[in-house]
Amino acid sequence: MPHPLPLPPEDRALSPHTGWTRAHWEGAADHLLAAVRPYAGPANALINLPGTRPSWSGPRSDGLEGYARTFLLAAIRVAGAGGADPTNLLERYAEGLAAGTRTPTTERNLSDGDLTSWGAITDRGQPMVEAASVAIGLRLTRRWLWDRLDPAVQERAGAWLAQALHHQPVDNNWWLFPFTVGGFLAETGIDTDAANAAIDRGLERIDRWYLGDGWYTDGRPRAIDHYNGWALHLYPALHAHLAADPALTARYGSRLHAYLADYSRLFDRNGAPIHQGRSLSYRFAAAAPLWAGALLGTTPLDPGTTRRLASGALRYFLDRDALDDHGLLTLGWHGPYPPIVQPYSGPASPYWASGGFLGLLLPPDHPVWTAPETPSPAETADAVTPLPAPGWLIQSTAADGLVRLHNHGSDDQPADEPVADNPLYSRLAHSTRTGPGTAGDNHFALLLDGEPSERGPITPLGAGRLGACGWAASSHRPRHRSAELPGITVTSLTLAHGADEVRVHVVRGATAGTAVREGGWAVTGARSRVTGRHAQITADDHLHTELLALHGWTTATTTPTPDGTAFGPTATTPHLHGTITTGLFATAARLTAAAGSLPALTALAFALADDVITITWPDGTTTNCPLPPAS
């Protein structure tokens, strides 16, 4: 059951879609901060939340994370209230700052002799990450906290932060942590040369990763995920805002504007952001770039849509067991869900979501708080939106507000040596109402010794529109048991229209007779039916999915996933099976929560002539598309 929050009554006149207003955001922030207070250690320096496992950085780092990430929320809350602090939040965090920076240590574990010291900032160490939240918090509350500190505390706190300027970050969004620390230290006159150099280095590094059209990759060649919004856009936008720098606002604000035009399409009518990528336990941090665009005045969204999307995301998670019985955020999506938790995450990691409260920095009379909510893109009209830069195709339907993301460009593979597929990146498709399981959902594979091949690094081949239809394509060299299969390539094409999609795969170089398999959408609960080469599954939450053979497949099955997905404890996945003959496989798929209003998927017709695909969709629309060439 959702944790009952002491929030005001809904206001459906101002917020017809979510019912939530600024008062609800303030109430949620106050609740989250009150819930962590009992877990503060001596002198409020470390906040070690209960949990079944520490992060790989150890309990001391986890305690610093508890301090830093909740301090960011406290700072937003107080700064947004013009310094009003009736529960003395800043007094406690100031005490923690003074105690934590007194004797920084490299000791990972806590001991009876030292329950207050923060970890020293080292090369690629987690305290560097948390230093950025501390720096933002101090910058937001400077006149109420920093400027009132004893000079000795300022000196040692500044020295602790300055360590971030002189150590090596992980080569991804971590470059923005010294950047963010540098912004505060430059402003306060501490180690200014190094601080300004860190700012320049951070911006130079992310500029290397800019793909265009508002999209970045996060260090690796094709690591495209939520870190675009809650890191790569957020930190430069915050710095530009706090520094009141018009040049930075113009440069990074224009990128943010372009990003939000696409990103706003990745939210479901029910408020859920797309379920894709790592660190999904950060949940409503997905709202942070929406607010950042409003802060900078560089958003394509009207104020009512900004609030509708942000409030929808916050409410989605708080209504779905994101909080435990103590009111603490858990490691998971709805409730706890270990399969999506990375080893770097500890009990306080979900409080990265504090950035989702950034809108409270906007005054109560700002239009994002006073304008009536307006519909999100997913609930206004059916849409297919190709995104060539990330290699994605967004498909949304107004009847159910569901969003699907067809992935032909993000794999999170390192540049040098490929690693095992991460299903949160490697799947052919992701959505706002399904998550990957363990049964090969949304994956095309060769079956070798009964084991499915992996997708490995993805080469995008473009994305675009063909009339009312959207398309995206890619190629990959399948891998098996950590090795590339020599001489084999798979070229994949997705076409989407309305609620339906057609997937085409061309396999080159594989031995005739090799078994192949395609998985569709994994839905929770689920009642299934198989008729010939057509599998249908209806889930407990009214989701309905189908997988229909169009070319090359011989049988259809459904496969239970006992471990379920982030959306439920059990799930079922439809599959099609075949063997290599011509090497061409085509599949029709559907994921919908409005099945009763759609024509039968079996009305879809597929033909191939002279390497041109002709699809007649169930609504009668016809699409012609050439087969994509091998990369």
Image (tube, grey):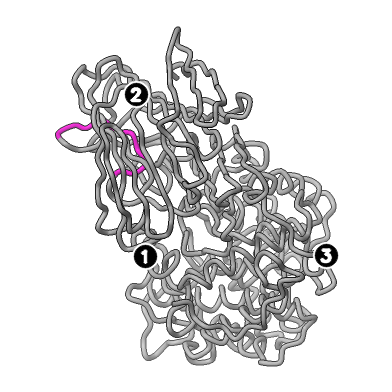
Q: Position of residue 459 (x, y in %)?
A: 46, 29
- What residue is drawn where x is 25% and y is 16%? 581
Measured along the vertical axis of the image, is residue 257 above or below residue 416? below
On whether residue 443 falls in the magenta region, the answer is yes
Residue 201 horizontal side relative to residue 459, left or right: right
Secondary element at image label 3: helix
Is residue 483 visible in the rendered image? The answer is: no
In which quadrant will I find the C terminus? Answer: top left
- Mark 3 Cα-neighbour bin, 10 Å: few <14, some 14–19, many ≥20: some
Which numbered disc, 1 or 2, marks the residue that appears first in the sequence? 1
Secondary element at image label 1: loop
Residue numbers of the magenta segment: 440-449
Which numbered disc, 2 or 3, marks the residue that appears first in the sequence? 3
- What residue is drawn where x is 29% and y is 29%? 484
- Mark 2 Cα-neighbour bin, 10 Å: few <14, some 14–19, many ≥20: many
Q: Indicate which label's residue lies in the foreground, 1 or 2.
A: 2
Q: Position of residue 403 (x, y in %)?
A: 54, 48
Measured along the vertical axis of the image, is residue 584 above or below residue 541? above
According to the picture, the residue beneath numbered tag 2 turns out to be 585
Secondary element at image label 2: strand
Is residue 169 visible in the rendered image? The answer is: yes
- What residue is drawn where x is 60% and y is 28%? 464
Q: Position of residue 624 (x, y in %)?
A: 54, 18
Out of 301 and 556, give the one closest to the viewer. Answer: 556
According to the picture, the residue beneath numbered tag 3 turns out to be 367
Q: Amino acid at mark 3?
A: Pro
According to the picture, the residue beneath numbered tag 1 turns out to be 337
